[in-house]
Every structure is written in structure tokens, then in C-alpha cells.
């Protein structure tokens, strides 16, 4: 499971010219699943995101977590995070999970993220063409891969 976590001052998701999700201070999570992902990956990643100290304290030091600042979250599925680009110029998505596996995992991730931060999570629409808009605060952008717990 791969996630791009972006600290935002605001973010939104538009599908078919309609805003379906909108947040203020918080994180936008772009989430990609692969077939080998498990519930353990979901639990580890949601806990990690909820506790990452990426928000500034009163001294301007990144020392506060999403939970501590009571930040909001939008989760957007993005299979392209598993693109293989080693050979040629056309990315291969063979490692990305098939929709019949990925969508239930995505839904489970959203539910667990809500539990991890004790707050409702907003989402994109799985498999839809979306316009994701954000103001990256900092900018702060992190890439986390549950297979490479660095």
C-alpha cells in the first residue's frame, strides 16, 4: 500500500463538475493498493498518518499530529502510485490491485482512518475521473509505502 500524504490548508475533490469533498486544515491522502496488501497494512498506515508530527506548534516547529490539531482528511484512490516506470516510457500498472480487491480495501482504509483520528473522513469516488484541488501547506508531502517501513 502506498500513500502520498500532503499537509493542506484546504483541499477538495470535484467529480462531474460537483464538489464531493472539501476540507480545511488537514491532510490529503492519495492511496494506492496492490494485491499483496492486508488489513495489517491498513492498520499500520492509518495509525502512522494519524500520529505523524507534521503540523507546526506555536513555535513553528513540526511537532503536532493530525489528531492533535483536529485536522481533517480526504482520501483519494490512486492506482497510478504503483506505476512501474523502469522500462520504456509507458508506465505499467501490473502491480496495482484490481478494482474488485482495491475498492473494498480502500473502503476499509477510510473506515479505519476515521477510527484512528476519531473523525469522519471525506473521500473521492473510487474509480472516477476526479479533479483534486489542494493548497499544500509548507509544502509538506510524504510518501509512505507499507512494504518499505522506513
Image (cartoon, helix red, strand yellow):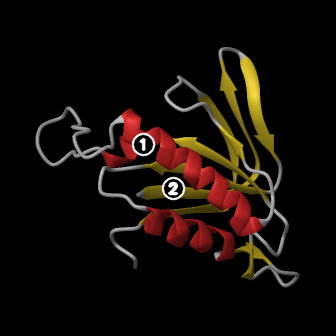
Give the secondary structure at mark 2: strand
Q: Quadrant of the C terminus?
A: bottom left
Residue at the spot 23% in from the left edge and 37% down from the top edge: 91
How far across and down, in percent of the image, does residue 63 sit? 73, 83
Residue lying furthest right: 58
Q: Which residue is mark 2?
A: 4
Query: Dot 2, crowdedness within 10 Å: few (<14), some or many (≥20)?
Result: many
Q: Nearer the viewer, residue 61 or 68?
A: 68
Figure check: 116 above or below 2:
below
Tell me which numbered mark, 1 or 2, is placed earlier along the sequence.
Answer: 2
Residue at the spot 54% in from the left edge and 68% down from the top edge: 43
Q: Nearer the viewer, residue 101 or 23?
A: 101
Residue at the spot 51% in from the left edge and 72% down from the top edge: 44
Direction from residue 39 to residue 53 in the image, left or right:
right
Q: Which residue is mark 1?
A: 102
- Residue 79 is marked as none
Residue at the spot 22% in from the left edge and 46% down from the top edge: 84
Query: Dot 1, crowdedness within 10 Å: few (<14), some or many (≥20)?
Result: many
Quadrant assignment, res 46 = bottom right
Amino acid at each position: 500500500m502506498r500513500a502520498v500524504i500532503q499537509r493542506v490548508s484546504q483541499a477538495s475533490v470535484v467529480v462531474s463538475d460537483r464538489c464531493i469533498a472539501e476540507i480545511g486544515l488537514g491532510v490529503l491522502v492519495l492511496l494506492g493498493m496492490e494485491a499483496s496488501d492486508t488489513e495489517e497494512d491498513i492498520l499500520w498506515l492509518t495509525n502512522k498518518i494519524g500520529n505523524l508530527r507534521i503540523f507546526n506548534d506555536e513555535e513553528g516547529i513540526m511537532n503536532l499530529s493530525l489528531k492533535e490539531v483536529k485536522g481533517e482528511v480526504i482520501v483519494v484512490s490512486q492506482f497510478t502510485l504503483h506505476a512501474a516506470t523502469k522500462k520504456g516510457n509507458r508506465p505499467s500498472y501490473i502491480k496495482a490491485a484490481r478494482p474488485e480487491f482495491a475498492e473494498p480495501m480502500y473502503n476499509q482504509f477510510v473506515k479505519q482512518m476515521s477510527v484512528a483520528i476519531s473523525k469522519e473522513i471525506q473521500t473521492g469516488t473510487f474509480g472516477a475521473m476526479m479533479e483534486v484541488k489542494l493548497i499544500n501547506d509548507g509544502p509538506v508531502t510524504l510518501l509512505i509505502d507499507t512494504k518499505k517501513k522506513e
